[in-house]
Amino acid sequence: MKIIGVTGGSGSGKSLFCGFLTELGAAVIDADEIAHRVIKRGGAAFDEIVSAFGSGILGENGEIERKKLGKIVFSEQKKLSLLNKITHKHIFKEMSETIEKIEHGIVLLDVPLLFAEDFPIEYDLSIAVIAQRDVRIARIAERDGISREDAAARIAAQMSDGEMAARADICVDNSRGTDELKSKAARIYNIIEP
């Protein structure tokens, strides 16, 4: 089995890139998907998040509204760090348990914070997916239904593309669109295939 860490900031196209690799045969473990589960009412991190950030982050249905929580954590680094501290232990536990169930092939760890100091899972190779800032802002604003200013604040709170590219074994620029990204994914899959 080969474990590949794939990272990229919001709006970079990291998950789309992973999707193309799964079409070619890789398995993916998506940290964002796990994060969505652990913050749902009844999820492993729900009570701790509400305790830390207050009931103002809840919607009428009693679930955490990600837009409300995002406005809080992406405006202040300490609050983002607190949210990460609460959620990461649950996310990493589930990722590790899933890896143990996979016997062979390529396993992609789709992780926004792959290069964070507390990332505890070992991987064989890292890939950073990056894109031009204005392209990312437009993607985030459209995808999440938020303003360009809020999208820019989200990017500002994350590791820069330059730092990710410097730390990754392979860097993929996704500024031009889907067809080019799919072609790059196919070339990279041929390189990493065990």
Image (cartoon, rainbow, N blue to C red):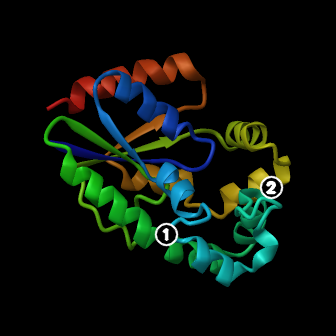
Q: Secondary structure at mark 2?
A: helix
The crowd level at tag 2 (other Cα within 10 Å; few <14, some 14-19, many 20+) is some
In the image, taking residue 121 as reference, residue 114 lies left or right, namely right
Give coordinates of residue 147: x percent, y percent: 85, 48
Q: Is disc 2 in contact with disc 1, using a CB cutoff of under 8 Å?
A: no
Which residue matches tag 2?
Answer: 150
Q: Residue at x 68, y 60 (%)?
A: 156
Query: Can residue 116 be seen?
Result: no
> Of label 2 and label 1, which has the lower sequence position?
1
Give coordinates of residue 93: x percent, y percent: 34, 65
Which residue matches tag 1?
Answer: 44
Quadrant position of residue 22: top left
Comparing 41 with 184, the one in front is 41
Q: Is the N terminus in the top left, top right, bottom left or bottom right quadrant?
A: top left
Q: Secondary structure at mark 1?
A: loop
Query: Can residue 20 be seen?
Result: yes
Q: Amino acid at mark 1?
A: Ala
Comparing 66 with 70, the one in front is 66
Q: Amino acid at mark 2?
A: Asp
Comparing 168 with 120, the one in front is 120
Give coordinates of residue 36: x percent, y percent: 56, 55
Q: Nearer the viewer, mark 2 or mark 1?
A: 1
Comparing 77 with 174, the one in front is 77
